[in-house]
Image (cartoon, rainbow, N blue to C red):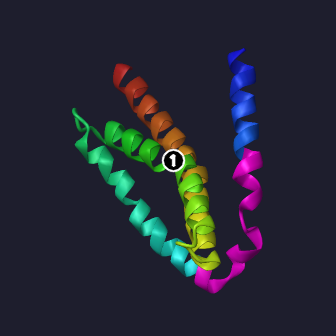
């Protein structure tokens, strides 16, 4: 039941938020520039790893990259902001591009950080 529920939640999310992503707008220089700016602001999530105790390299990277991967709520807030007129289409597209980038890239980097940490632990044991 849990697997089905997980799959249905992903399907629902894709059907509600995924179809409104303005992919064609991502090629615009204005959208790309604003997305880069939003991504810089998103790097602040990485800094949350500095609050980890004990503050080892592996712990800091794991927590920081995991926090950077959270973005589902941003889709909902951005959509509501667009619908209420708080965001224009260009800013909306830039925000979604920045969120998509962090949601795709951060887990890949987190996995690499965890694997590197595991390899270092295995070498230390030998």
Question: Quadrant of the rendered structure where residue 92 is?
Answer: bottom right
Tag count: 1
The magenta stretch is 14-31
Q: Does residue 34 sit above or below 108 in this rendering?
A: below
Q: Main secondary structure of the magenta part?
A: helix
Disc 1 is placed on an element classified as: loop
Q: Residue furthest bottom?
A: 29
Q: Residue furthest top?
A: 1
Question: Quadrant of the rendered structure where residue 100 is?
Answer: bottom right
Q: Does residue 43 sit above or below 86 in this rendering?
A: above
Q: Does residue 57 sit above or below 1 in this rendering?
A: below
User: Residue 33, percent across and down?
Assistant: 54, 80
Seen from the viewer's position, the closer of residues 77 and 23 is: 77
Seen from the viewer's position, the closer of residues 120 and 3 is: 3
Q: Residue at x 36, y 38 (%)?
A: 58
Q: Looking at the rendering, in which quadrant would you find the C terminus?
A: top left
Q: Residue at x 71, y 20 (%)?
A: 3
User: Residue 9, percent across and down?
Assistant: 69, 33
Q: Residue furthest front?
A: 84
Q: Looking at the rendering, in which quadrant would you find the N terminus?
A: top right
Residue position marked by numbered label 1 in the rendering: 69
Q: Is residue 28 magenta?
A: yes
Left or right of 46: which side holds 119? right
Badge 1: residue crowd in 10 Å (few <14, some 14–19, many ≥20) = many
Seen from the viewer's position, the closer of residues 67 and 16 is: 16
User: Residue 67, percent across and down?
Assistant: 43, 45
Res. 101 in view = no
Q: Residue at x 63, y 66 (%)?
A: 83
User: Residue 94, percent across and down?
Assistant: 58, 72
């Amino acid at each position: 039941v849990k697997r089905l529920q997980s799959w249905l939640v992903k399907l629902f999310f894709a059907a509600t938020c995924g179809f409104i992503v303005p992919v064609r707008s991502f090629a615009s220089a204005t959208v790309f520039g604003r997305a880069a700016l939003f991504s810089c602001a998103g790097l602040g999530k990485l800094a949350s790893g500095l609050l980890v105790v004990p503050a080892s390299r592996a712990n800091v990277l794991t927590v920081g990259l995991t926090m950077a991967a959270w973005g589902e709520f941003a889709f909902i807030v951005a959509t509501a902001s667009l619908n209420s007129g708080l965001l224009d289409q260009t800013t909306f597209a830039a925000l979604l591009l920045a969120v998509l980038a962090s949601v795709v890239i951060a887990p890949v980097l987190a996995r690499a950080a965890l694997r590197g940490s595991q390899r270092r632990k295995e070498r230390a044991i030998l």
